[in-house]
Structure formats: structure tokens, C-alpha cells
Image: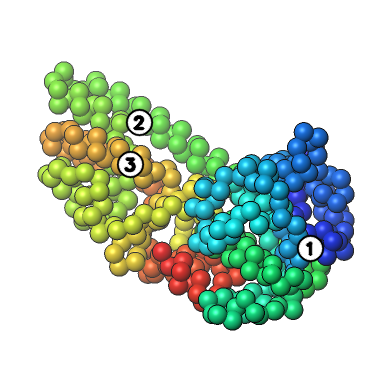
Amino acid sequence: MASLRVFVSSTCYDLSSIRSHLRQFIITMGHQPMMSDYNDILYDPRTHTHTSCVEEIKNADYIVLIIGGRYGGNVLPDALNVVDFDELKKQSGSKTIFDTKEKLSITQLEILKAIENEIPIITFVDSRVMNDHATYEKNKTKSISKDIEYASIEKPHTASFIFEFINFLRKRSYNNTLHTFSRPEEIESTLRTQWSGLLQRLLYDERTKITERKEMENFSTQIEDLKTAILASIGGGKIDKEVAKGVVVYRKLVDFIRGFALTSYDFIYEEDMNFDQFLEKLDIVKIVKLPPLGRRKEYNFHTTRDAQALIKSDGTFYLVTNLYDIDYMRIEFNNFMRLSRESRKIIFDSLIEINTSEGILFRNFLHISNKTFSEFKQELEGDAGNIKSENDKTQNDD
């Protein structure tokens, strides 16, 4: 049986006792540690050890990052070539670390490679470093900032590099879990809780996927039956053919439009518009893509899919899973609008009357009117255990 491969990324010398403690814990939990100081890393003789460490990240299942007061050595230039910095810049509200990427440490580059490969990361920051980070945040724009020495940081000139890397991690929109610690036992306790929770979530999601798959199979059967019935009942005219095809092709689009729970849908077949004009009519001003939200009991909403927030001008929003991918809905909507108004009305009315996908729609489309998207996003960040300053709350509102 394959074991969970846990890559421990940190500076080795100042954190050696913690790393040793953590290694034994990982083994005791039945997992396989990956640690450079214990020869768990494959060093390809054709490359530098820095490059080998970064490349080995791709073979990990989970990353534990420990940040202390030591920065470590700068990575060699050749190792920088294995990371896509342009893509990484898009993934965080803090991009300062990329201004001097040639000064990145090997530990930092390992984590950037893990982010690039979508590997789960949990970060632990020494509580003394985190306290000094708060001081850094308050003073970094002041003229005295370069003269401040931080007790937790071994070499004063590396302070900004450590603190800005923390900013990069915690200002990501997802996979940004960050905790402080004072003792190794606190790391163990958090990991034990997180791994147990992930296993529980995995089992729940698998049960949900099975249920969703059965419902989709039943729904597909109903659609095929409907298609057969329509084709058997219509004539051979142009409108008839459009309707027969449209009832099958635009079922998901009609479900998507129904999700907005409008009092009237007449404008769908009485007016001609494109998708952007449709969103404008609904007062939707912004679309934000979200990672899988999991189980949200307070909203009776659950999905293992990526999701999207369709934000209105007043800040309230619709939560929509990628069952109704916005880019795909845009194409389908514009194609639908190319049909005659008569065909649109027949197709739309027929699919609303059939109403076979109510259960699927209910779990994949939700209007949240009692709070703004900014408040909802702060809830998500709080659930992930993200440590945030008041400045972050303002910056991440959008």
C-alpha cells in the first residue's frame, strides 16, 4: 500500500530538532517523510542539488513548510528556470517576492514549485517571527524600516525577504493555510487534526460524488426519453428541427438561467442580447472563480467542484458550481440567442415545464442575499485558519 509522501520544507540547521521531531511523528502516523537532511531526496547527478530538491517536490502528496528566523542560502540561478514565475504572480495579492527572485532561498523555491503543481501546503511560522512580522507590516513603508532589527531574525538584512514570503503565502486566495507555533507538539497536534479532517472530507466527497453521478445518469436517461418523444411528435419544418435540437442542447443553459429565480423570463425570447448584456440586466458586475467550497451547512450548499461567485452591484452574490461553467454558459447563451424568438420561447417553456433537474440545480446554484461577497470571502479565509491583519481585510475585499 502506498504511503502519503510528506515533504518537509524548511531551513535545516536552525530547525534541526523540530525536523527530527516531526520526522518521527510522520513515520508514526504511517506516512513517508521526504527530507533532504535524511537523504530522502533523489539527487540527479546531471543537475545541481538545488534543482533536484525543487524537482522532487512534484513527487510529494503534501507539503509541511516551517518558517523560522533563518533565511537560508540563495538558490542558484539554474534552479529558477524550473518555476513558472509569470503564472505564480497571478496567484497572490502580494507579489513583492518576485521583484528580487534571484534572492529567493531554496526553501522558498520549493514552495513555489509546490504551488505551481497544486500540491496542498500547510505552513507553520515560529510565533516570534509572526510577532515581528506584525511590527514589520506596520513600519515597512516608513523611512526607518531598514534600520529596525527583529529579535527573531538571525540576519537583519534577510528580514524583509522572510516577511514578504509570509505575505505571499497568506494572501493567496486558496491553499494558504498558515499557523503559528512555539513548540513542536503544536505542529503535531495541528497536523493530526488536519489530516483527520481531510480524510473525513474525502470520504464525504466520495459519497456525494456517487450520489451526483447516479442523479446525472437518471437525468441523462430522462433527457434521452424526452428527445425521443419530441422527435416522434414534431414535423419536418425548420422551427420543428430547431426545437427538437434545442431541447437537448440548451437544457443546461435553461437550468442556469432558472437558477436566478426571476419573476419573469419573457425577455429571454422577446429581446435579443448577448451574454454580457444578460449579466448587466441581472445587475451582475463581477465574476470571481473559487476553489471547491466543500460542505457549507449554513447555506445548505455542498460541492466538490470548483465554484464561481456572480457578484451584484450591492455586493450580494450567487454561488454557482462549475456544473454551470461561466465560460461555457457564455458560448451557449450567445448560440441560443441566434435562434428565432419563436424557437427560443418553445424551447425555454418546454424545459421549464419539464423541470426534471430541480434537485441538481438546488445544490449547484444559490443566491446569498444576507451578506456581501467580501464578508463571505473572509469567512472562507477564517475557515482555512488564515492569519490576517486588518490591512489584509481591506485589500482582499474584491
Tell me the quadrant of the picture where the N terminus can be found: top right
- In this image, 59 relative to 383: left or right? right
Q: Point out residue 154 in the picture as x, y percentages from the top left corner.
A: 77, 71
- Of labels 2 and 3, earlier in sequence is 2
Tell me the quadrant of the picture where the C terminus can be found: bottom left
Residue located beneath label 3 in the image: 329
Q: Residues within 10 Å of mark 1 (few under 14, many from 20)?
A: some
- Secondary structure of the residue carrying tag 3 is helix
Residue located beneath label 1 in the image: 188
Q: CA distance from mark 1 to mark 2?
A: 51 Å
Q: Amino acid at mark 2?
A: Ile
Q: How is the image coloured?
A: rainbow
In this view of the protein, can residue 231 be seen by the observer?
A: yes
Decide: is 306 above or below 124: above
Residue located beneath label 2 in the image: 223
Q: Amino acid at mark 3?
A: Met
Residue visible at 46% across and 69% down in the picture: 395
Residue visible at 79% across and 63% down in the picture: 188
- Secondary structure of the residue carrying tag 1 is helix
Residue visible at 64% across and 65% down in the picture: 161
Q: Point out residue 328 in the picture as x, y percentages from the top left corner.
A: 35, 39
- In this image, 155 relative to 271: left or right? right
In this view of the protein, can residue 64 be seen by the observer?
A: no
Q: Point out residue 266 in the picture as x, y percentages from the top left corner.
A: 15, 48
